[in-house]
Amino acid sequence: MRRIGVLLFAAVPVAVTAAVYFLVPTDSADSPGDPSVATAQQASRQDARSRAEQERSADDELIAQLPPGLAAPAKKELAQRLVSTAESSTLDWRRTYGDIEDLDDGQGYTAGTIGFCTGTDDLLALVENYTKEHPDNGLATYLPALRAVDGTDSHEGLDPGFPAAWKAEAEVAAFREAQDTERDRAYFDPAVRLAKLDGLGTLGQFVYYDAMVFHGPGIDEDGFYVLRERALRKADSPSRGGSERAYLDGFLDIRRAAMRERRPNADTSRIDTAQRRFLDDGNLRLSTPLEWRVYGETYRVP
């Protein structure tokens, strides 16, 4: 999982969302190694971010007029269960607050319900925000080490005590609430918001959310926003008059390819036998009952 920064995209009228926030194509004919090209792409993406933030108030009015979709309490609970089967191989996502391990994926420790990582800023942000409200918590003493290892897979300053401290803190209700808050701030809310602005229904909102969790809310080569950019070049989103099913089909193709490009042997069942299955069934509302398979295991929600 890659979590590099947090980028909130938005648009004014839904019909022009993609046009306003198109990023510079990453498959330019120019050499990707050319520093001038990389600098120009980065600058353009930062400009898009600035425009999105400036126009957010207009988007808030638009979002308020739309159905809750995945943000409805029952659907949000379903979303956490679906993600948990891919992240932790269980429907019971609430039992994963105390989970922590190094998955040997270059991200350091992965912990908690959504897989916060010591190497990708989000775990650091979680502990910093939590410590502001609860300065005497059992993780606060690790903040200097967490800042030092951010962006790396190092355990320096964290071993041997950090995993035990995490598990102990996960028994505290306030820390469980803090994990939920950071999950929503960094992943759920931005994904659902942008999916709505792209004209997507509940399934599409979940597709964006799961991609945000796995690929990270960044503007790096296979971050969520770059994958969305590629999808918008392949097919129009519903907000631009396109077919919802065709757009989501293209998005899932692009996401699957990105997973395989990064790791040729990556298990893509969270797409192939879960999200793709819902799409092929025409279940754009993500209605229950649902049945899907991840990593060879079958899950059902009545």
Image: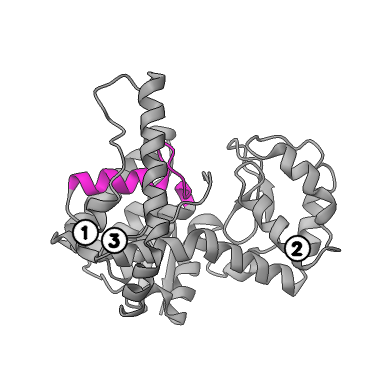
For the residue pair 151 and 60, the one nearer the viewer reads as 60
Secondary structure of residue under mark 2: helix
For the residue pair 26 and 80, the one nearer the viewer reads as 26
For the residue pair 104 and 130, the one nearer the viewer reads as 130
Dot 2 or dot 1: first in sequence order is: 1
User: Does the stretch in magenta take in 216?
Assistant: yes
Residue occupying image coordinates x 66% and y 72%: 177
Q: Is residue 95 left or right of residue 12?
A: right
Residue occupying image coordinates x 42% and y 57%: 53
Q: Which mark is residue 277?
A: 3
Amino acid type of the residue that numbered disc 3 sits on in the rendered structure: Arg
Q: Which residues are magenta?
A: 214-234
> What's the distance in space between the residues labelled 2 and 1, CA to CA?
39 Å
Q: Which of the two marks, 3 or 1, is nearer to us in this view?
A: 1
Q: Is residue 67 above or below residue 132?
A: below
Q: Is residue 224 above or below residue 188?
A: above
Residue occupying image coordinates x 17% and y 54%: 236
Residue 8: image quadrant is bottom left
Q: Is residue 32 above or below residue 75?
A: above
Secondary structure of residue under mark 1: helix
Alpha-carbon neighbours of circle 2 within 10 Å: few (<14), some, or many (≥20)?
Answer: few
Where residue 149 appears, as percent x and y from the top left, is: 71, 37
- Residue at the spot of label 2: 132
- Residue at the spot of label 1: 16
